[in-house]
Amino acid sequence: YIDATCPLVSKVHKQTERYFDKNYKIILIGHKGHPEVIGIQGQIKDELIIIQNEKEAEELKINPKNKIAYVTQTTLSIDDTRNIINILKRKFPSISGPELEDICYATQNRQEAVSELSKKCDLVLVIGSENSSNTKRLAEIVKKRKVEVYRIASVKEIQKKWFSKVKNIGITAGASSPEILISETINY
Protein backbone atom coordinates (compact mmCIF):
# COMPACT_ATOMS: atom_id res chain seq x y z
CA TYR A 1 0.00 0.00 0.00
CA ILE A 2 1.00 3.61 -0.41
CA ASP A 3 0.24 6.11 2.34
CA ALA A 4 -0.76 9.26 0.46
CA THR A 5 -1.69 11.20 3.60
CA CYS A 6 -0.47 14.79 3.50
CA PRO A 7 2.55 15.18 5.83
CA LEU A 8 0.83 18.05 7.67
CA VAL A 9 -2.24 15.88 8.31
CA SER A 10 0.03 13.03 9.48
CA LYS A 11 1.66 15.50 11.87
CA VAL A 12 -1.76 16.36 13.35
CA HIS A 13 -2.51 12.63 13.70
CA LYS A 14 0.73 12.14 15.66
CA GLN A 15 0.11 15.20 17.85
CA THR A 16 -3.37 13.89 18.66
CA GLU A 17 -1.95 10.49 19.60
CA ARG A 18 0.76 12.07 21.82
CA TYR A 19 -1.77 14.23 23.67
CA PHE A 20 -4.03 11.19 24.12
CA ASP A 21 -1.13 9.11 25.48
CA LYS A 22 -0.45 11.87 28.05
CA ASN A 23 -4.12 11.95 29.19
CA TYR A 24 -5.04 15.33 27.71
CA LYS A 25 -8.63 16.28 26.96
CA ILE A 26 -8.30 17.10 23.24
CA ILE A 27 -10.10 19.85 21.35
CA LEU A 28 -10.12 19.61 17.56
CA ILE A 29 -10.65 22.91 15.78
CA GLY A 30 -12.35 21.84 12.56
CA HIS A 31 -15.56 21.13 10.70
CA LYS A 32 -17.74 18.22 11.81
CA GLY A 33 -18.09 15.58 9.12
CA HIS A 34 -15.10 16.77 7.07
CA PRO A 35 -12.97 13.78 5.92
CA GLU A 36 -9.84 15.18 7.59
CA VAL A 37 -11.68 15.65 10.90
CA ILE A 38 -13.06 12.11 10.71
CA GLY A 39 -9.51 10.85 10.10
CA ILE A 40 -8.11 12.76 13.08
CA GLN A 41 -10.93 11.43 15.28
CA GLY A 42 -9.99 7.91 14.23
CA GLN A 43 -6.49 8.20 15.68
CA ILE A 44 -7.60 7.78 19.30
CA LYS A 45 -10.20 5.85 21.30
CA ASP A 46 -11.64 8.88 23.14
CA GLU A 47 -14.10 11.31 21.63
CA LEU A 48 -12.54 14.61 20.57
CA ILE A 49 -14.27 17.90 21.35
CA ILE A 50 -14.87 19.51 17.96
CA ILE A 51 -14.99 23.30 17.89
CA GLN A 52 -16.12 24.79 14.57
CA ASN A 53 -16.33 28.51 15.36
CA GLU A 54 -15.77 31.27 17.91
CA LYS A 55 -19.24 30.89 19.43
CA GLU A 56 -18.62 27.21 20.20
CA ALA A 57 -15.22 28.10 21.68
CA GLU A 58 -16.84 30.70 23.96
CA GLU A 59 -19.53 28.24 25.09
CA LEU A 60 -17.11 25.36 25.72
CA LYS A 61 -17.07 24.06 29.27
CA ILE A 62 -14.25 21.79 30.42
CA ASN A 63 -13.10 21.11 33.95
CA PRO A 64 -10.01 23.34 34.26
CA LYS A 65 -8.34 20.64 36.37
CA ASN A 66 -8.02 18.55 33.19
CA LYS A 67 -4.93 18.79 31.05
CA ILE A 68 -6.26 20.36 27.84
CA ALA A 69 -4.76 20.46 24.34
CA TYR A 70 -5.95 21.42 20.90
CA VAL A 71 -5.13 20.40 17.34
CA THR A 72 -6.42 21.90 14.10
CA GLN A 73 -7.75 20.74 10.78
CA THR A 74 -5.11 21.81 8.26
CA THR A 75 -7.42 23.46 5.70
CA LEU A 76 -9.05 26.11 7.88
CA SER A 77 -9.00 29.87 7.51
CA ILE A 78 -6.00 31.21 9.39
CA ASP A 79 -7.91 34.24 10.71
CA ASP A 80 -10.83 32.16 12.01
CA THR A 81 -8.48 29.60 13.57
CA ARG A 82 -6.38 32.31 15.23
CA ASN A 83 -9.50 33.80 16.81
CA ILE A 84 -10.64 30.42 18.13
CA ILE A 85 -7.18 29.68 19.56
CA ASN A 86 -7.12 33.07 21.29
CA ILE A 87 -10.49 32.35 22.91
CA LEU A 88 -9.31 28.93 24.09
CA LYS A 89 -6.08 30.41 25.51
CA ARG A 90 -8.06 33.07 27.35
CA LYS A 91 -10.45 30.50 28.84
CA PHE A 92 -7.79 27.83 29.51
CA PRO A 93 -4.43 29.58 30.07
CA SER A 94 -2.51 26.31 30.43
CA ILE A 95 -3.84 24.80 27.18
CA SER A 96 -1.26 23.17 24.90
CA GLY A 97 -1.32 23.37 21.13
CA PRO A 98 0.58 24.06 17.92
CA GLU A 99 -0.34 27.71 17.22
CA LEU A 100 -1.05 28.05 13.48
CA GLU A 101 1.85 25.99 12.17
CA ASP A 102 -0.42 23.12 11.13
CA ILE A 103 -2.46 25.16 8.69
CA CYS A 104 -1.50 23.93 5.22
CA TYR A 105 0.92 26.34 3.53
CA ALA A 106 -0.85 25.79 0.17
CA THR A 107 -4.13 26.70 1.85
CA GLN A 108 -2.58 29.71 3.58
CA ASN A 109 -0.97 30.99 0.36
CA ARG A 110 -4.25 30.68 -1.52
CA GLN A 111 -6.17 32.48 1.23
CA GLU A 112 -3.74 35.40 1.19
CA ALA A 113 -3.75 35.51 -2.62
CA VAL A 114 -7.55 35.44 -2.95
CA SER A 115 -7.81 38.25 -0.42
CA GLU A 116 -5.58 40.39 -2.65
CA LEU A 117 -7.25 39.16 -5.85
CA SER A 118 -10.71 40.11 -4.60
CA LYS A 119 -9.58 43.74 -4.23
CA LYS A 120 -9.12 43.86 -8.01
CA CYS A 121 -12.21 41.99 -9.20
CA ASP A 122 -15.95 42.37 -9.58
CA LEU A 123 -16.45 38.61 -9.45
CA VAL A 124 -14.33 35.64 -8.37
CA LEU A 125 -14.72 32.01 -9.41
CA VAL A 126 -13.43 29.49 -6.87
CA ILE A 127 -12.78 26.07 -8.39
CA GLY A 128 -13.22 23.10 -6.09
CA SER A 129 -15.54 20.34 -5.01
CA GLU A 130 -18.55 20.82 -2.74
CA ASN A 131 -16.86 19.01 0.16
CA SER A 132 -13.56 20.91 -0.09
CA SER A 133 -13.00 22.84 3.09
CA ASN A 134 -10.33 25.05 1.59
CA THR A 135 -12.45 26.12 -1.40
CA LYS A 136 -15.26 27.03 0.98
CA ARG A 137 -12.80 29.17 2.96
CA LEU A 138 -11.62 30.88 -0.24
CA ALA A 139 -15.20 31.74 -1.16
CA GLU A 140 -15.86 33.04 2.38
CA ILE A 141 -12.82 35.33 2.18
CA VAL A 142 -14.08 36.83 -1.10
CA LYS A 143 -17.61 37.18 0.30
CA LYS A 144 -16.27 39.06 3.36
CA ARG A 145 -14.78 41.59 0.94
CA LYS A 146 -18.30 42.12 -0.52
CA VAL A 147 -17.27 40.74 -3.93
CA GLU A 148 -19.55 38.42 -5.89
CA VAL A 149 -18.23 34.86 -5.71
CA TYR A 150 -19.22 31.50 -7.15
CA ARG A 151 -17.72 28.19 -6.10
CA ILE A 152 -17.76 25.77 -9.02
CA ALA A 153 -16.77 22.13 -9.32
CA SER A 154 -16.29 22.40 -13.09
CA VAL A 155 -16.71 24.73 -16.06
CA LYS A 156 -20.14 23.14 -16.68
CA GLU A 157 -21.54 25.06 -13.69
CA ILE A 158 -20.63 28.51 -15.04
CA GLN A 159 -23.59 30.67 -16.07
CA LYS A 160 -23.11 33.44 -18.64
CA LYS A 161 -25.53 35.72 -16.78
CA TRP A 162 -22.96 36.04 -13.95
CA PHE A 163 -20.78 38.17 -16.23
CA SER A 164 -23.32 40.69 -17.57
CA LYS A 165 -22.06 43.64 -15.51
CA VAL A 166 -18.58 42.39 -14.68
CA LYS A 167 -15.33 43.99 -15.86
CA ASN A 168 -12.73 42.01 -13.92
CA ILE A 169 -12.96 38.30 -13.13
CA GLY A 170 -10.69 36.53 -10.68
CA ILE A 171 -10.11 32.79 -10.74
CA THR A 172 -8.68 30.71 -7.93
CA ALA A 173 -8.79 27.07 -6.94
CA GLY A 174 -8.53 24.86 -3.91
CA ALA A 175 -5.20 23.21 -3.22
CA SER A 176 -6.44 19.84 -4.47
CA SER A 177 -8.27 21.06 -7.58
CA PRO A 178 -6.91 19.33 -10.70
CA GLU A 179 -5.04 21.51 -13.20
CA ILE A 180 -7.44 20.46 -15.99
CA LEU A 181 -10.38 22.14 -14.20
CA ILE A 182 -8.41 25.36 -13.84
CA SER A 183 -7.34 25.32 -17.50
CA GLU A 184 -10.91 24.67 -18.69
CA THR A 185 -12.20 27.57 -16.59
CA ILE A 186 -9.54 29.96 -17.89
CA ASN A 187 -10.24 28.88 -21.47
CA TYR A 188 -13.98 29.43 -21.00
Image (cartoon, grey):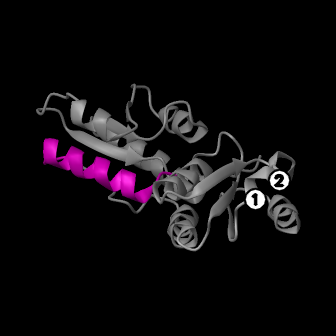
- Amino acid bearing label 1: Phe
Q: In the rendered structure, does residue 80 fall within the stretch colored magenta?
A: yes
Quadrant holding the C terminus: bottom right
Circles 2, 1 touching at the beta carbon (< 8 Å): yes
Q: With 168 as the anchor, is 156 left or right in this view?
A: right
- Helix or strand or loop: what does disc 2 sit on? helix
Q: Is residue 39 visible?
A: yes
Q: Quadrant of residue 60?
A: top left
- Amino acid bearing label 2: Lys
Q: CA distance from mark 2 to mark 1?
A: 6 Å
Q: Which residue is mark 2?
A: 160
- Helix or strand or loop: what does disc 1 sit on? helix
- Residue nearest the viewer, comparing 96 with 30: 30
| Residue 179 pos. (x, y %) | 81, 64
Category of crowding for the residue at label 2, using alpha-carbon neighbours closer than 10 angstroms: few (below 14), some (14–19), many (at least 20): few
39 in relation to 125, above or below: above
Q: Which residue is mark 1?
A: 163
Name which residue lies at 20% across and 27% down.
61
Name which residue lies at 22% across and 46% down.
87
Q: Main secondary structure of the magenta part?
A: helix
Name which residue lies at 17% across and 33% down.
66
| Residue 2 pos. (x, y %) | 75, 50
Where does the magenta region start and end?
75-95
| Residue 85 pos. (x, y %) | 28, 50
